[in-house]
Image (cartoon, rainbow, N blue to C red):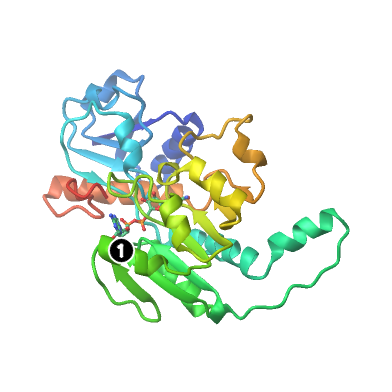
Amino acid sequence: MSTVALLSRDTLLLTQLQKAFAEHAPQLRTVLADDPAIAEAQVAACWFPPEGHLGLMPHLQLVHSVAAGVDHLATDRSGAAVPVCRVVDPDHRRGMTEYVRWAVLNFHRDFDRVARQQRDNHWLRHPQRPAASFKVGVMGLGSLGSAIASDLAGAGYAVNGWARSMRTLQGINVFNGDSQFDGFLDGLDVLINLLPLTEATRGILCRKTFDALAFGAVIVNVGRGQHLHIDDLRQALASGQLRGAVLDVFEQEPLTPNDPLWQTPGVIITPHMASAASHECIARQVAENVRRLHAGEPLNNRVDPALGY
Ligand code: NDP
């Protein structure tokens, strides 16, 4: 029987994963970090693993993120250099699509403005703007970004997409690489970040990026908190260059109760809830990769260590 170590600082998540593995992957034995049997584990399934825990596994052969992103694995640098995989859940796409649709509609149809007006008992109709004249840009056209871009194009928005490598996506104006970044940003009304966090993408939501958007544009950050330069965001909101920001991810999570961002006008905060893989899907995908590992077959959703995603 293969042993999988479940590693996270989130104790509720650990309990939920233990239950899901017992139900959907009973062929695997799961252990937590305080169990001496962790020394027998060949696989670690992780979400922000505490520092030092990967180093407790001399037989480690695979590190599996239980999410789409893998940047959180850097919180524990004690592991051996073994393959890293991530979870890609079709329902993940659905959740992210719902979230981004809501965020875009909120500004496209002026719900942000009328919500403020209601606080002042103020009746004012804003001119209705066709979706086709609302320019939306999606940074990152991977498993999630490509689904979001296609959904928004299907809803009638004018959609630009940006990725590292070139590809064709029906109905999307695709840009690629650093040389086409400015062209991608030019005049966007909404910028949606669905990039992984890597050294190349850290801090990409900064003043220079905001200045290339339409005046009064909006950003939706569902990537990672470290993509966003907070001081630049505050300045852009204060100057009116940005009309609003929907933020789901933060450098420190949870965001502390006294963080000034909570009360920054124009900012909508959600608690890293845009989308999550189901616990059943995590258990099944980890189990399938454990099977593949032992059978010597190629692993699913393997991360390229050179690219970091
Ligand atoms: P993928 O790895 O499938 O896609 C990443 C995309 O980003 C690819 O299109 C890739 O380009 C592009 N990219 C990477 N680096 C660069 C770069 N330097 N310049 C331009 N484009 C780049 O990731 P997913 O779609 O599965 O997930 C994206 C991110 O979303 C995750 O890493 C995670 O941080 C975040 N996320 C947030 C959630 C939330 O609830 N807020 C939930 C799930 C994920 P190419 O195609 O050319 O390789």
Query: Most extreme residue toward the left, as rendered?
Result: 296
The one nearer the camera, 41 or 218, is: 218
Q: Is residue 242 above or below residue 185?
A: above
Label 1 CB less than 8 angstroms from ligand 1: yes
Q: Is residue 201 above or below residue 105?
A: above
Which residue is located at x 21 percent, y 48 percent? 291
Which residue is located at x 54 percent, y 34 percent? 254
Residue 242 occupies quadrant: bottom right
The one nearer the camera, 139 or 12, is: 139
Please indicate, yes or no, whether residue 177 appears anywhere in the rendered image: no
Which residue is located at x 39 percent, y 41 percent? 21
Residue matched to label 1? 163
Which residue is located at x 31 percent, y 36 percent? 73
Left or right of residue 302: residue 14: right
Left or right of residue 115: residue 107: left
Horizontal and vertical percent for residue 164?
A: 26, 61
Residue 243 occupies quadrant: bottom right
Horizontal and vertical percent for residue 103?
A: 58, 61
Q: Amino acid at mark 1?
A: Ala
The one nearer the camera, 281 or 208, is: 208
Please indicate, yes or no, whether residue 184 appears anywhere in the rendered image: yes
Horizontal and vertical percent for residue 143?
A: 35, 62
